[in-house]
Amino acid sequence: MTVRRRALAAVAAMITSLIATTPAGATDTEVDLALVLALDSSASVDADEFALQRGGLAAAFRDREVVEAIAAGPLRRIAVTVMEWAGAVQQTVSVEWVVVADSTGALTLADRIDALERAIPTGATSIAGALVFGNALLRTAPFEATRRVIDLSGDGRNNQGQNVEDVRRLVVAHGVTINGLAILNEHPTLNHYFQDRVIGGPGAFVEIAEDYSAYVGAIRRKLIREIRSLTVSDAILPPESRVQLVAALPPGP
């Protein structure tokens, strides 16, 4: 069997497994949001570009407004995991599921992300494979989540594995929202591809970074929008509580 056929068979097996599997039993922990953050580690991403993804994501969790968004939720906590993705069978968990419920938790997560070593040095671009893997992480997460979201960053189109639109339909059918962060350094119209073929589910949207240097601002905006959602209001949490939550954060820019 060729490498390509083995990869396709493995992806097909994962999809079949997801169809047949019911969500794992949750623990007593309830969260407003279970969020999979998927970082592009394919061949089109060099070491400096991956470092900008990693650093931008870490900076976002040090941002006062991101933590305020968490504080505005009914349960005042979210669950986060970070993964890398490349080819059809090239995905790995970089940060296991962690609950972020205060500024200390957000800063601790930021430090963990900053310390990550790149686990996948190269590979094809299988958005479909990343979505299958992210969906599996959500379905086995040990939390009861009001919303479940895959936040996928990428700079290219799906070029290996299953048809990405087929996988999108499967993932959305499981109650998951897929959001995209399109990095336009190589494909100036990638945001349209993400809009048409990748994102899906309630409130799905595409954020844009013109290049990797703009990633830090784009992932910050994206996280704030994802965490808040259209159903979350600052009125849920008294202002004095939000002030207490973010007091340990450094001043914003």
Image: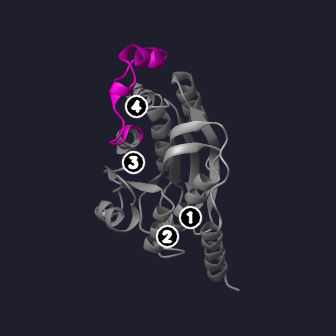
The image shows residue 192 at horizontal and vertical percentages of 29, 64
Classify mark 1: residues with Cα within 10 Å, few (<14), some (14-19) or many (20+).
many
Q: Nearer the viewer, mark 2 or mark 3?
A: 2
Question: Compared to 198, does 73 lie above or below?
Answer: above
Q: Position of residue 98 (x, y in %)?
A: 62, 37
Q: CB atoms at circles 1 and 2 under 8 Å apart? A: yes
Tell whether label 3 touches label 4 (CB within 8 Å): no
Q: Label 1 belongs to which residue?
A: 132
Give me the residue at 60% from left, 70% from top: 19
**Residue 62 circle label:** none
Tell which tag, 3 or 1, sits nearer the viewer: 1
The residues tagged by marks 2 and 3 sit, at their Cα atoms, a distance apart of 27 Å
Q: What residue is pinned by disc 4?
A: 69
3D distance between C-alphas at marks 1 and 4: 28 Å
Residue under the image location 33 percent in, 25 percent down: 235
Q: CA distance from mark 3 to mark 1?
A: 25 Å
Residue 249, visible in the rendered structure: no
Q: If you read the primary sequence from the N terminus, does the residue marked by circle 4 or circle 2 appear first?
A: 4
User: Secondary structure under badge 4?
Assistant: helix
Which numbered disc, 1 or 2, marks the residue that appears first in the sequence? 1
Q: CA distance from mark 4 to mark 3?
A: 25 Å
Looking at the rendered structure, which numbered label has been put on residue 167?
Answer: 2
- SS assignment at label 1: helix
Q: Nearer the viewer, residue 224 or 21?
A: 21
- Highlighted magenta segment, given as a residue range: 227-253
Q: Pointer 3: residues within 10 angstroms few (<14), some, or many (20+)?
A: many
Which mark sits nearer the N-terminus, 1 or 4? 4
Q: Quadrant of the C terminus?
A: top left
Residue type at numbered disc 3: Tyr
Does residue 58 show up? Answer: yes
**Residue on which disc 3 sits:** 212
Q: Left or right: 240 with respect to 139?
A: left
